[in-house]
Image (cartoon, coloured by chain):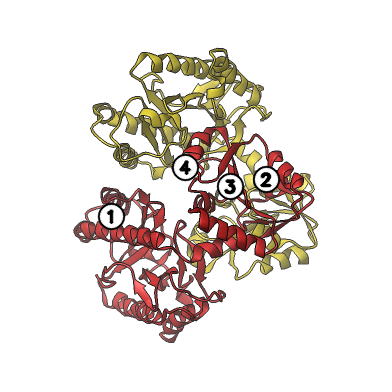
Chain colours: A yellow, B red
């Protein structure tokens, strides 16, 4: 992160009457410092920020961090700084574990703040470029595999792994999450784990690439019979109309409602058992979540997924997902046809 | 988990004066119920335990859980139960996030308990068999690759991925953690990430397989010059003597001290920048950690790793690691020679 952006974040922190923020989440740490810890590390973000890391991670931290790095043996080091500098109100992440929370508690207030989540909602042009590249790699890799998919010669597990190889061959460092390569009745589980069984129909693939640590996220369902087609068309309508409605100013829950209403009108409201989408970036799930209870206003340069789905228990499921860059409208990233 | 074991765990909970325990960690949940959540889920463990899960995970939960499952929209459901049943003292996991902690807080005491970590320390014969099988798969897969390793034709990233393919071909469901396949000066970083560079010497591989959700963990370093050999021999001595000392009754910090003293005597104490080992099971890092500040007594049917290492900054690193089953002594799992 450049110095100017970091300064702005610290200013925002001070504007909210915090004296500093304690950061432990790996991607928050990487976001502000460019050092992505591989062991327990903690950062005190303030005008002169400092990262405490373990000896085993020091060489990596020193080689990558834009922020001063020290080693520590115990969280008492951090508590002493907080005390010595007379801090009164410190921001913490909502993901902080209760054990660390109790260890760093002292004569000051520790308050959950969504400051970094909010900063990370609006992507820079550099971040957008990385997400686009990740998506491009993911789509290219999928297309290269499509003949293998359709022969149904291989197991789900083998196909998931072949896709992973293809992602790496095309320049990704890894998957952005464990590939969901599922088929037959297992498609009714939104987070199905690929099995050793040969591929059956329908086929549902939910996959992503990580490029320079940024994620992509796409889902395609390949269908073959009339009933599947009927369901597919409803999901496609929800997908298309929701994406069309994306523009700065609309709220997350309004987008969720568009998708949910369409599916409900067709009688499958009870079978749309997850949120309509989510933002992504360094993490595969970022804010805002596109859900009935999320009132975040969509803004320019957010990146969000739209992924309506219908799941018929023990029969099959259909989901279509793409990643959208919010400009003055919603621009789908990549040009992989949702109908395969 | 069988009913009898679950009953025993609940008894232990009551013996510690808890009215129940709130479980959110995926592997803790799987350990007690056989349901491994793929979305936010929470369990109230007590005489009549209950799991709250999201709609999207309900089909999976119902198909796998030994414990009653309900869906929930908000954590208020859980709070109401706690209130209605007049609970006073509830155990929580140390990994619980502060956001959930605050949401479930009420007119009762929430106290961190290591009950489940302790229950998980001693492995059943079924768990031991799975860890042994995972290790066998990991070693077999590595040996199949050894010629490729030594030709140095491929990149670290390619080799890491080839190893992953081999693990799956041999029956693993996945890696037990991201494979560390590193070489040349990058070996000085204990958690180095494989790069696109061709393999150089020395080569350090730290890898594991997951079999029926149970992990294996092994590290080998392949050396080629005199200096590397000098360091290797010190690490090997620390590895051998520490394993020899394993027996029920010895403490974790005593084992750490044996390894650390040997390396320190040779003048490299400052270069042994991590703990000597850790337990493993469903998680790759479980309790006890074999570290200077851990006084846990080693017991029969614990499974622990011993992994001393020496890291020379910007030059190279050497680590040797095996997984040990504690019987009346320390029995190394698998028979992959530490000297390759």
**Where is mark 1, residue-wise?**
B198
Instruction: Answer above or below: position of B50 versus B90.
Output: above
Q: Secondary structure at mark 2?
A: helix
Residue B63 locus on image (x, y percent) = 46, 38
Q: Secondary structure at mark 1?
A: loop
Front-most of A291 and A43?
A291
Is circle 1 on the same chain as circle 3? no
Instruction: Answer above or below: position of B113 versus A191.
Output: below
In the rendered image, which quarter is residue A278 located in? top right
Q: Are marks 4 and 1 in contact (CB under 8 Å)?
A: no
Q: Residue at x 45, y 75 (%)?
A: B271
Tag 3, which chain?
A
**Where is mark 3, residue-wise?**
A2
Is circle 4 on the same chain as circle 1? yes
Is circle 3 on the same chain as circle 2? yes
Residues at marks 3 and 2, CA–CA distance in whole angstroms: 11 Å
Front-most of B302 and B9?
B9
Tag 2, which chain?
A
Q: Are marks 3 and 2 in contact (CB under 8 Å)?
A: no
Foreground mark, 3 or 2? 2
Tell me if I can see residue B207 in this picture: no
């Amino acid at each position: 992160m450049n110095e100017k952006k970091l300064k702005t974040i610290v200013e925002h922190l001070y504007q909210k009457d915090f004296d500093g923020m304690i950061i432990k989440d790996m991607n928050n740490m990487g976001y502000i410092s460019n050092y992505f810890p591989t062991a327990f590390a903690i950062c005190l973000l303030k005008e002169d920020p400092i990262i405490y890391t373990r000896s085993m991670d020091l060489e990596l931290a020193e080689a990558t961090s834009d922020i001063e790095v020290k080693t520590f043996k115990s969280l008492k080091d951090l508590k002493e700084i907080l005390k010595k500098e007379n801090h009164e109100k410190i921001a913490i992440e909502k993901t902080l574990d209760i054990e660390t929370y109790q260890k760093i508690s002292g004569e000051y207030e520790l308050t959950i703040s969504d400051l970094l989540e909010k900063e990370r909602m609006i992507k820079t042009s550099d971040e957008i470029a990385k997400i686009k590249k990740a998506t491009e790699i993911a789509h290219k890799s999928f297309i290269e595999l499509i003949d293998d998919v359709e022969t149904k010669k291989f197991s789900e597990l083998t196909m998931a792994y072949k896709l992973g190889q293809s992602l790496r061959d095309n320049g990704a460092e890894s998957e952005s999450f464990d590939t969901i390569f599922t088929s037959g009745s297992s498609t009714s589980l939104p987070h199905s784990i690929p099995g050793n069984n040969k591929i059956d129909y329908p086929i549902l693939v939910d996959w992503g690439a990580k490029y320079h640590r940024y994620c992509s996220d796409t889902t395609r369902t390949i269908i073959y019979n009339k009933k599947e087609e009927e369901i597919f068309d409803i999901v496609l309508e929800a997908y298309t109309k929701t994406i069309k409605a994306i523009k700065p100013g609309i709220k997350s829950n309004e987008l969720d409602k568009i998708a949910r209403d369409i599916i409900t009108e067709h009688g499958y409201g009870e079978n749309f058992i997850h949120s309509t989408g989510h933002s992504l970036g360094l993490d595969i799930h970022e804010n805002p979540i596109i859900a009935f209870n999320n009132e975040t206003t969509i803004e320019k340069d957010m990146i969000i997924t739209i992924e309506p789905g219908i799941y018929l228990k023990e029969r099959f499921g259909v989901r279509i997902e793409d990643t959208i860059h919010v400009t003055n409208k919603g621009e789908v990233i990549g040009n992989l046809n949702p109908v395969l």
